[in-house]
Amino acid sequence: GGIATVSMGSSTGLRLAGIASVSEGDTIGMGLAGIANVSEGNMTGVHAAGLATVAEGNLEGIHFSGLATVAERDVTGLHVAGLATVAEGSITGISAAGIAVVGEKSITGLQVAGLATVTHGDLAGISISGLATVGEGSITGMHVAGLGVVSDGDVDGIGIAGASVADSSSEFWDLMPRGVTPDEQTGPRHRGIFVAGLRADAATVEGITVAGMINRSHDFDGIGISAHNSVSGMQRGVQVGLLNYAEDLRGVQIGLLNHVPSNPWFLRWLPIVNFRF
């Protein structure tokens, strides 16, 4: 159709439209539209649109959109959008968007976003975001963000952020040398390798953490490198920094000043090295 192709029911096959291809039922096959491909049911196959690809059901297959790819249910497959890929359900597969990849329920696979990758559920796989990667559930895999990797749940894998790798309850600019508060002691666990330009913050940490300013936790097991390492509970392993603090220690602190309140009084404050096994 020079302007549009319209189906009052389902549509199957090849559709070419100067402006829009619209189906009131399911859409299966291939579609090319100058502005939009729209389905009031599920959309399956290969579709390209100058502005948007929209499905009121599931979106499955390969889809290219100049602005947005949107589904009211799940998105599965390969999806490329100039601005955003959005699913009110889950996103599974490979998604690339100029601004954001957003999955309400969960995101699994490889995601690349100019600003943010966001989900209210679990995030698993690989994500690269210019600004932030945010998961309100657990985060698993490798995640790189220009500003922060943030989670309400556990983080397992590799997290690299220009500023912060932390749980969502942490105050971004809170760089004061203190331990995790009692309310934060049962919070998320970080397990793996984490690198942050400013701070890394979690209730429990297992692995290697490198932070430019603050590395803060309640229980720490592994290697921590930061200007200030602060553990309000038990530290097992090695801390390296300018100022190191651990309420209880089963390991080594290396730094300008090291503080372990549970040590005998003459070993609580030591320069260069402090240890307890």
Image (cartoon, rainbow, N blue to C red):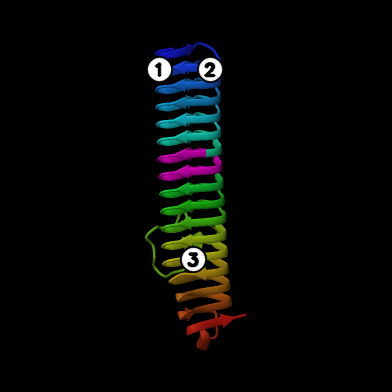
Q: Give amino acid for label 3.
A: Val
Instruction: Residue 195 in the image: state x and y as whole percent.
Output: 49, 61
Image mark for residue 18: 1
Mark 2 → mark 3, Cα distance in angstroms:
53 Å
Q: Nearer the viewer, mark 3 or mark 1?
A: 1
Which element is circle 2 on? strand
Residue 14: numbered disc: 2
Residue reaching furthest right?
277
Residue denoted by label 3: 210
Tag 1–tag 2 contact (CB < 8 Å)? no
Quick check: is 102 in the magenta stretch?
yes
Return the residue nearer the eye: 272 or 7. Answer: 7
Q: Quadrant of the N terminus?
A: top left
Q: Which residues are magenta?
A: 95-120
Q: Nearer the viewer, residue 226 or 173?
A: 226
Residue 203 place in picture, x, y as percent = 53, 61
Q: Earlier in the sequence, mark 2 or mark 3?
A: 2
- Name the residue at 41% across, 44% down: 114
